[in-house]
Amino acid sequence: GESVGLHLPTLSVQEGDNSIINCAYSNSASDYFIWYKQESGKGPQFIIDIRSNMDKRQGQRVTVLLNKTVKHLSLQIAATQPGDSAVYFCAENRVGGFKTIFGAGTRLFVKA
Amino acid sequence: DGGITQSPKYLFRKEGQNVTLSCEQNLNHDAMYWYRQDPGQGLRLIYYSQIVNDFQKGDIAEGYSVSREKKESFPLTVTSAQKNPTAFYLCASSAQVNTEAFFGQGTRLTVV
């Protein structure tokens, strides 16, 4: 069925290294993708988004890449810091819809 | 400060009792949402509302009810018909379709 899924449930990186979190989606009609960060016991926070007419978007220390050919989304975090430790969700909005579909999340651990 | 507020943060109820979770936003957003999050899982949509006095079922609406009498408020009632109500509940709002959602800090409901 349709889903937004993540390849890895956990990711452990050394402080200062770059992190890459991957996400696959199955609905080629999706036109808007969002990455959220969720710290323990809190609600998700918006990190960055990308629309289907783009293949790359950069923010502060973060970059999202969209490959529509293979329906793959990734979040790159540069110079990962201890404060980046959290669960990261990719989310997908269907065309004209309110139903945002969330993946299961990847937990990022940053080792000092 | 503009934002979205959920209360209470923790809630304990006996099995068979209805309970209402509060969600208020002062962002002037038209759309509001309720999600449920279980441990190690993503967010699943319970109900959403595009505008005042209108709401739609999400993917897991059974055992829940909502109302949207005011633009800034979208309370969720967990009824005794919900078979497994213990979970983390997240409320969100967005300005329009296919824009980022802003989340509250969540309510952790425990039914004993």
Image: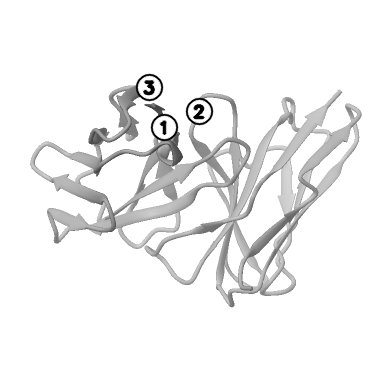
**What residue did someone put label 2 on?**
B41
Q: Are marks 1 and 2 in contact (CB under 8 Å)?
A: yes
Looking at the image, is mark 2 or mark 3 nearer the viewer? 3
Q: Amino acid at mark 2?
A: Gln
Residue A8 % position (x, y): 31, 22
Q: Chain of mark 1?
A: A
Residue drawn at the location 70% of the way across and 61% of the way down: B74
Could you tell me the amino acid type at mark 3? Thr
The residue that disc 1 covers is: A105
Query: In front: A18, or B37?
Result: A18
Residue in the image at 85% along x and 43% along y? B19
The x and y percentages for residue A75 are 26, 42
Chain containing the residue with disc 3 = A
Distance from the alpha carbon under mark 1 to that under mark 2: 7 Å
The numbered disc on residue A52 is none
Foreground residue, B82 or B74?
B74
Q: Residue at x 48, y 34 (%)?
A: B42
Q: CA distance from mark 3 to mark 1?
A: 9 Å
Task: List x then y, in percent, for residue A94.
Answer: 33, 53
Q: Residue lying furthest left in this view?
A: A69
Q: Secondary structure at mark 2?
A: loop
What secondary structure is marked by label 1?
loop
Image side of residue B71 versus residue A53, left or right: right
Q: Is residue B41 left or right of residue A81?
A: right
Q: Which residue is mark 3?
A: A10
- Whether B106 is drawn above or below A14: the answer is below
Q: Give, as a three-letter code, the residue at label 1.
A: Gly
